[in-house]
Amino acid sequence: MGRITDAVKNLLIINVIVFFGTQALPERIKSMGNMYFPLSENFQPYQILTNMFMHADFQHLLFNMMTLFFLGPLVEQALGTKRFLQLYFLSGLGAVVLHMGIKWFEYQGIIAGLDPSEISAVANEGLSILNSGRNYRGELGELNYILNGSILGASGAVYGVLIAFATLFPNMKLMLLFPPIPIKAKYLAAGLIALGLFSGVTGFQQGVAHWGHLGGAIVGFIMIRFIWKLQSLR
């Protein structure tokens, strides 16, 4: 890997500062940087941006920042700093749009079979119930996760960078951590997309915003191949 590039360095610094700087805040305040469902009382427009710099725990932060650190510089060198930042933030936005779009269809299907008083009760009381480690059963519980759950993390933006890397450098070999074997970037990207799609459809690995990852990946691919029309470099 070459030298760390300007945009990658600054994104790493901001993410790390935000993570450690928010650890001492009460959960109620810290969580307002997460992205909530637009119909939730907890939703604020600024969350579309701030959620990209929030992380659930150190492992979440470490995985995203390691991917950005190792793959980001080559992508930034290939695109230039301006285009790289466009890729990063639009991929993060794409993650929010696809995730919330899927949740919108789920929401419509759930409320069709519920009484308005039940919906109101979940909207008003559901967050405190989730914060206590409990939840409703059945459809009310699913509705509560939609209205009062949130997504956070740079994963969507990082997936856009990863897919951009695989599109630009498809045959470059990357070393996996588990197991420690080399794999071409195009195969790694295809495997992650397949796993994300499977998990999103089946509900495997609940608590992970699989559709958000896919949204970021889709935007990254479209920007490289169809908007900027860049070809493979290696």
Image: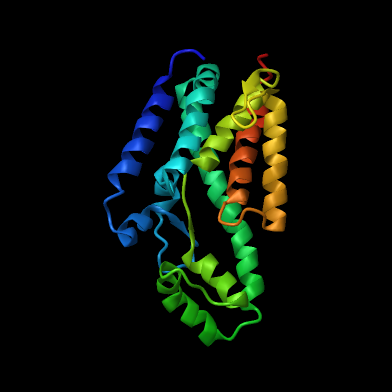
Residue drawn at x 59%, y 31% is: 162
In which quarter of the view is residue 229 placed?
top right
Residue drawn at x 46%, y 75% is: 123
Residue drawn at x 46%, y 50% is: 152
The residue furthest front is 179
Residue 171 lies, with reference to residue 23, above or below; the image says above
On the question of residue 33 being in view, the answer is yes
At which x and y percent is residue 190?
Answer: 72, 34
At which x and y percent is residue 78?
Answer: 55, 17
Residue drawn at x 51%, y 17% is: 77
At which x and y percent is residue 105?
Answer: 65, 64
Residue 80 lies, with reference to residue 129, above or below; the image says above
Q: 79 or 194, which lies in front?
A: 194
On the question of residue 223 being in view, the answer is no
At which x and y percent is residue 230?
Answer: 65, 21
Q: Colour scheme used in the picture?
A: rainbow
Q: 29 or 87, which lies in front?
A: 29
In which quarter of the view is residue 227 placed?
top right
Q: Is residue 70 left or right of residue 42?
A: right
Quadrant assignment for the C terminus: top right
Q: How many marks?
A: 0
Q: 180 or 14, which lies in front?
A: 180
